[in-house]
Image: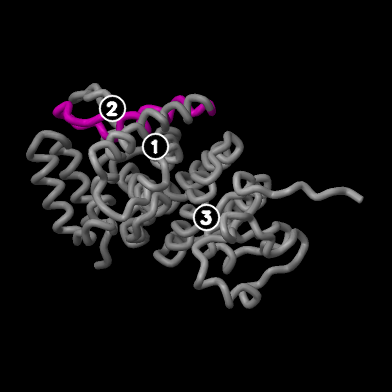
Amino acid sequence: MVEREEVTIDMLMPLPKEMLKEMDFSEVAIYLIHRGRPVLYKNKGVPLSFDTISDIYDRLDNFYILRSDAKFVVEEIGKKLREAFSKPADLSNMEVVFEQLSHLVDMVLASPTKEQMDFVKGMYYMFADYMESEPQAAYLVAFTIKKDFTTTLHVTNVSVLVAGFAYHLGYRGDRYKDICVSAFFHDIGKVKVPDDILKKPGKLTMREFEIIKRHTVWGAKILKENGFDKHVPVAMYHHEYLDGSGYPEGLTGSRIPEDARLVQICDIYEALTGIRPYRDPLAPYDALSLLRDNFVLKGKVGKDLYSEFLVFLYRNRYD
């Protein structure tokens, strides 16, 4: 008789429960966490339908899978993205793309292995090709972003805004692909930030903010270690301001990479319009006014970039 290996919490990763409605998890074991210990909910090879979990679905934030099964889930996400990329870029399909990209973010933040990161790069190259082949898609992205206080949605929101804005600015080909991938990885360093700080339902203390600021350096290190050197500048410098008041190095003016500045304005706008525990989200007009008054007029963000961002968002509307 072969003894089954005991499963420990560090062998598991969260599976966003919304995915259980969309995918077939028959070939993946599903776990719950009860009193700090993993509990097998469904074994591998056992069919799973939403009807079978509906009694506990609303009472749980996450189900769990083995990290070793992450590849299966990511590949299922890839299938759904490829299917979406084969369809016209109307609002309905762009919402499907957004949802699957957010699932991809969830999986990579939970397990940022080189294999996962390489898969993401391939998917975002396909996303960039899709955006280039469907020019109207760039002006639908603002309708797809979601408002919630999670790193996953923040990263997804920023990445789709960057994809739209970069296309608007004339990025094409390899340059366009690269900034789309860089936008996805811009906050990868937050995997090193303790959850009690990252998910704190309130304003951060000065000490906590200093820890959060290190995500730029941590992100650059993760990318370098996995061979993603060309995406390091955005992860490292997307919090630098033109006047030198940013971090981690206090760079000024043209010393800040152009791609980092592009990602930054999308990052700031998303943060202002998104939900935070300590304030309500700002309406787009109010967010843009604050961005102008607190960042552009104070020399932190470039006026020309801001002006183009206004034009880009104006075109993200229904006539």
The kind of residue on which mark 3 rests is Phe
Q: Position of residue 261 (x, y in %)?
A: 26, 35
The kind of residue on which mark 2 rests is Pro
| Residue that numbered label 2 is attached to | 248
Give me the disc on residue 85.
3
Mark 3 or mark 2: whose residue is earlier in sequence: 3
Residue 117 sits in which quadrant?
top right
Tags 1 and 2 touching, CB below 8 Å: no
Mark 1 or mark 2: whose residue is earlier in sequence: 1
| Secondary structure category for the residue under label 2 | loop
- Residue drawn 42% across and 64% down? 90
Residue numbers of the magenta segment: 226-248
Residue 162 sits in which quadrant?
top left
Mark 1 or mark 3: whose residue is earlier in sequence: 3
The answer to whether 91 appears left or right of 55 in the picture is left
- Residue drawn 52% across and 39% down? 121
**Dot 2 alpha-carbon crowd within 10 angstroms: few under 14, some 14 to 19, many 20 or more:** some
| Residue that numbered label 1 is attached to | 179
